[in-house]
Structures are given as structure tokens and as C-alpha cells.
Amino acid sequence: DIFFVDMWFVVKKVFVKFLVPAALLGLPFVVPVYAVGFDVATFATIFSVIFVILVGFFIAAATANYLSLQTHLAEENAYLIALFNLGVAVQPSMKKKLGDVIDVYLIAAVDYPLLEYANKTRKELQDVVDVVDSIEVKASDPKGMVALDHLYEAKVNLIRTLHSVAFSAPRVVYGIHWFILAALASTLVFLLLTLRTGEVLAGIVVGVLTISLYLILLLLYEVDNNDFLEDALAYSDVQKVFEAMGKLKYYPETAFTRYGKDQLQLDKDYRVGVYKNYPKSMEKKIKVVRV
């Protein structure tokens, strides 16, 4: 199952990134030359202005969410490292138990896409909170009391940050919006095709403009879907938390198809989550790979 899922991802990426633009470039040379009985320039200007305003608004909103989510993810990892270090400082005997529950939470979080993990890992997060709340310090240890205060503060900040992640992750553009944008873009393409004169250069210009409309919509989709953020991080940021706790890095097996070993920078021993029935179930077996 995982093989077919990964192959579908690769095929879809090739189709979206290469085949569709190539087809759009050849569109002016395939569609017969036609003309309309109204002023094309006026209508093209009107539709272009509406398209630019809507796309600009949605890209601005999606980018704001993207930047906010990027900040919150960095804060989450920092708070997890702080929880572990402070918890060990307050009660050293809790090192293994605290490290294990954070490890389980991170593994669960990495398995899900950025849009879903904050809502899919509530149980694992609650286990982390329960272990943190069980940490005790002697009243005669003033440094431990101060560290415990910072520990609780980090816990509260972590929960607040995850709520912010859940708020920032959802998409800005919904189905009705995509329908309007697609209708505007299709109308503009229809009007552009009327500008052809039968010359090759005119066809190339119209093809390039058509591809530009498509790429603008693709850019909006990738920003809104947090694809850019996932590609930029490529599982690298969360690995710092594993290393801080003395755990091996962890990657789901889907990461290797999407990014490859070179981008994942597998220079040390690491763990791989092998799913039993993906994507129907997230149940998996974790294997250790020695480098």
C-alpha cells in the first residue's frame, strides 16, 4: 500500500509541475483560431483586475498563516526541549519517563501532515502534560523550586503554542473560492486565445500567459496547503528535539519518497516508521537503521 501511495505522490507531482504547464503551452497551437464580436481588451481588463484582487488577497492571508505557523513550530520544538531539560533538572529520576513520552508525542506528530498533527496528537500531548505534572521537588531545594516554576511555564507555553498551530494550520481558500478563481482564470484564457494571429510568436506569448495564470493558482495552493513549509523543514527542525533528549532521529517511510536520503541528511543512525496499512491506519513498526 505504501508503495502505491508513494508512486501516486510522484506521478501527481510530475503531472502538476511539468505535464500541465506543457499542455497549456501547446494549447494556443491546438485550439483553432477564433474571434469574438465584442471588445476583448475591455473585458480582459475587468476580469484581470478582479482576478488580481482576489488572488492577492488570498495569497496575503495564506502567507500570513504560513509565517505564523512557521514561528509556532519553532516555538513548539524549543518548549519541548525546555520541558525535557527542566524536568531532568528538577527530578533527574524522571529523565527516561519524560524523554519517552515526548518521544512518543513527536513520532506521532511527524507521522501526520502539518494541517492535521495538532488535532491528531491530543492524547500523546496529554501524556506529556501528565508526566510533567507528576514531577516533584523537595521544599528544601530552592533552585529546584525555581526550575519547577519555569517547567510549568514552559508547559503552559507549549499548550498555547499548539492551540496557535491548530488555528494557523487550516486553509484560507475553500471550494467556492477555488471555483471563482478557476472561472476567472478560464475566462481570461478564453479571451487570450482570441488575440492569436496565427503566428508562432503570438501563440508562444499566449501560452506563456496561460501558464502564468496556472502557476499563480498553483502558488496559492501550495502556500495555503503549507507545502512550502513542509518542503522547507523536511523533518529537519524536529530532529533537534530528538537529539537533545538523546534519542535517534525518526522519519516516517513516506519521507524518503518525497525528499530522498540526501535532503534528509542521514549522517547518523536513525529510526524509520514502517506502516502496516497506510494510509488507512497509522499503526507502524519502528526500525533502527545503522549508518
Image (cartoon, rainbow, N blue to C red):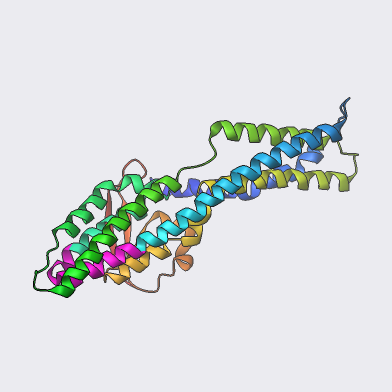
Towards the viewer: 160 or 143: 143
- Image point (54%, 33%), residue name: 175
From this view, report whether residue 182 is shown above or below residue 248: above
For the N terminus, the quadrant is top left
> In the image shown, does 186 or 124 lie closer to the viewer?
124
> Residue 164's spot in the image, x, y percent?
40, 50
At x 33% / y 66%, what residue is drawn?
241
Give percent across and percent down for residue 21.
Answer: 68, 46
Judge from the rendering whether residue 43 lies leftward or rightward of residue 53; answer left or right: right
In the rendered view, does 41 fall on the left or right side of 169? right
What quarter of the picture does the C terminus occupy? bottom left
Give yes or no for residue 150 being in the magenta stretch. no
Magenta-highlighted residues: 78-97
User: Would you say the magenta stretch is mainly helix, strand or loop?
Assistant: helix
Instruction: Report which quarter residue 77 is drawn in.
Output: bottom left
Residue 69 seen in the figure: yes
Q: Is residue 289 visible?
A: no
Relative horizontal placement of residue 38, taking residue 268 as reference (left or right): right
Where does the image place residue 70, in percent across and percent down from the top left?
46, 57
